[in-house]
Structures are given as C-alpha cells and as structure tokens.
Amino acid sequence: MSELILNVHAAPPARPRAASRGNRKHRRFLRRRRAERRRRGPSREPEPARASPSSEPGGSGSPGPAAPPGGAAEAAVVAIDCEMVGTGPGGRHSALARCSIVGYGGAVLYDRYVRPAAPVVDFRTRWSGIRRHHMARAVPFVAARKEILRILAGKLVVGHAIYNDFKALKYFHPQALTRDTSKMPLLNRKGGFPENATVSLKRLAKELLHKDIQVGKSGHSSVEDARTTMELYKVVEVEWEQHLLLTPKQE
C-alpha cells in the first residue's frame, strides 16, 4: 500500500490593515506642507514686517497696507487676532473693529480697522486700543469680512480664544484647521499651569516666551497679539501636530 503524503501549504495569515488614523483634512494639510517644502527647497523664514506708527494702538489713521506674504512653505499657517468694540444697548454686543493676520514668520498679511454695521456705543479703548477717529477711515464690516475670509480659506489658523474672533467675523473655520492656544494642555504644562485651565495670552507669553505684552493703558495691539500667538504655537508645533495626527477626533 503506497504511502499517501499530503502537503498543505498554508499561506501566512494576512496582516490586518491598520485602521485609518487621524483626521483626513489634517493629513492632507500635512502632505501639502511637506510637498511645498520639497518643491521650494530650503528657504529663510521671512522677517516680521514692522508695524507702521499708524497701526500702533493710539496712533492716528488706520493701519497701513498689508505686507506681501513671504515665500516660505509655512504660508499655509496664519495667526489671527481681533479687537472688538461695544454696540447695541449698553454696548454689550461685541462687534469687530480691528483685525490683524500674520504669517508663520510674523509678517503682517492683513491689518485693518473695521467699521461695525451698528453705531459704536463703547469703544473699550482700555482693552481694544480703538478710538473714535479710527472709524473715520475704517473698512465696512461686509467688505473687511470678505477679504479676511479669502485670506483664511484653506489655511491652518492659529489664535488665542479664537472662537471669539470667529464669532465677531460671523464665521466658522474648519475645526481640523483651527489651533486655539487657549485650549492646549501641552502649552499649559510647559508654562507650569494646570492642564485644563484657561490661561491668558499675556501670562503664557511671560512664562514661555519671556516677554511682556498688553502693557500700558493704550489698549492691546492685535498685531502683537497675533505674532505672540504664532510664537506660542511654534513652541509646541511638532508635538501638537503629531498628537492631532494620531487622534481621530476632529472631522
């Protein structure tokens, strides 16, 4: 009786496909940044544009024309800060009166005084730096909003308590492309603050950047605040983006 030999060649078990990790919009954004860096090659970060005297809080006239953006690959990242005045009964409604947008290197991309649709009841000068004469050459809200949204479109937008800025603009930016430095536990840890605390931009700047902002009685400078927010983002950029890439939270 011949011996029957049965050879069974079992294929190795297929490796399970890794689950899709992270947010698709965020992955696409990172791929675009990497491709842009490869295309442009090494380049120097653009120097921050110097604010003209008229754009400083308490200065006369309206902020000067926007500086052209630098050619660095980080052009897809901007920081925004807005100043508000009070309209409506008792000036309790916050309305946009100045908006500043800076690039990754601090260059001013947009800086304009904005005239609200409703009459201004409270200029809130102590905080906003806005005075009555700033409204004389201010851009109407509708026109300013259109230009601002054109700049923000498709960008990763950094801000501190940025929901207040978007509310004043009557706008919702994609969450996957929004970075709020007031809600970043990693920044708080580095500054020695409780992770879940909401820490002011001024205190974070003092602890992490070792600089003083929002000093004096002339009000805030939205250009200075936007630049400071971008600097804080850079402190944790690599760790923050890696965390978001691996956390499929934002859609």
Image (tube, helix red, strand yellow):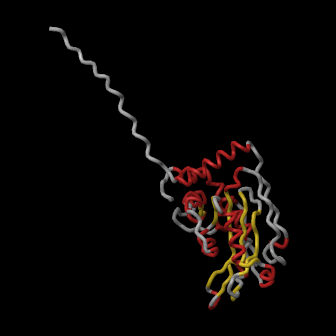
Q: Position of residue 98 (x, y in %)?
A: 72, 75
The residue lying at 72 percent from left, 73 percent from top is 144
* Quadrant assignment, res 47: bottom right
Foreground residue among 104 and 210: 104
Q: What is the count of numbered marks?
A: 0
* Quadrant assignment, res 99: bottom right
Residue at the left extreme, as displayed? 1
Foreground residue among 123 and 236: 123
Q: Position of residue 38 (x, y in %)?
A: 69, 42
Image quadrant holding the N terminus, namely top left
The residue lying at 78 percent from left, 85 percent from top is 132
Q: Position of residue 92 (x, y in %)?
A: 62, 86
Q: Is residue 103 above or below residue 18?
A: below
Residue at the bottom extreme, as displayed? 89
Foreground residue among 39 and 160: 39
Q: Is residue 173 above or below residue 219?
A: above
Q: Position of residue 151 (x, y in %)?
A: 70, 63
Judge from the rendering whether residue 78 lies leftward or rightward of residue 11; answer left or right.
Answer: right
* Quadrant assignment, res 61: bottom right
Q: Is residue 108 above or below residue 29?
A: below
